[in-house]
Amino acid sequence: NAGVTQTPKFRVLKTGQSMTLLCAQDMNHEYMYWYRQDPGMGLRLIHYSVGEGTTAKGEVPDGYNVSRLKKQNFLLGLESAAPSQTSVYFCASRKRAGGGDTQYFGPGTRLTVL
Amino acid sequence: DAKTTQPPSMDCAEGRAANLPCNHSTISGNEYVYWYRQIHSQGPQYIIHGLKNNETNEMASLIITEDRKSSTLILPHATLRDTAVYYCIVIGVTGRRALTFGSGTRLQVQP
């Protein structure tokens, strides 16, 4: 049971380049999330998904797109990277349940945009 | 979700109990108190959560006041590996239930 994994772990992009970050979970969780964390700050929600084939915007969605074609995978895309998107990106998942369930986080992807 | 207030930093001696406070005076009846921590450069890690009653697990204890307006996370025997930023988060049971991370408390365990 690997939990939540993220690919790649590190990436350097030039301004205007595109890339896709992959998040995978093997816990059969319904909900998945993408957060970003800038230096010295807490995590902020980019997009989330409440099930296969569904996505929704979080607090800071601009410049990002997501897809959830398979229940176990949640992809985060940057179509035209900007230096402001330099950050650490964390994926998380949780079961769909009532109160009392928890989120499980991946190890993060460190992205630098030059 | 209710807002939380935590001290920015705390120190604790290794082997002693670390008591991390959190104020959540606007919490509503169906909102839970969750604690996560983030060790440097790693993804956040779930510690414990509660609604009304005090809770204990293998990692920590959570004490919630009777009026639910504040809580304390207790690490009974802090080790150097407990050095991290600790986040207190209040979250309801409906909706997207994404976590709203504030600045947290940076706990430094001293040898």
Image (tube, helix red, strand yellow):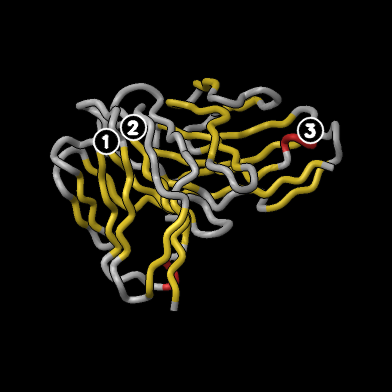
Residue hosting label 3 = A81
Residue hosting label 1 = B32
Q: Secondary structure at mark 3?
A: loop
Q: Secondary structure at mark 2?
A: strand
Which amino acid does the dot numbered 3 rest on? Answer: Ala
Report, in whole angstroms, how far the alpha carbon at label 1 lies from the one at label 3.
Answer: 37 Å
Which chain's residue wears label 1? Answer: B
Cβ atoms under marks 2 and 1 closer than 8 Å: yes
Residue A5 x/y as whole percent? 54, 50
- A62 or A50: which is nearer to us? A62
Residue A54 x/y as whole percent? 50, 21
In the image: residue B3, left or right of residue B106: left
Residue B7 x/y as whole percent? 41, 49
Q: Residue drawn 39% across and 45% down?
A: B6
Report, in whole angstroms, how far the alpha carbon at label 2 lies from the one at label 3.
Answer: 32 Å
Q: Residue drawn 46% across and 65% down?
A: B108
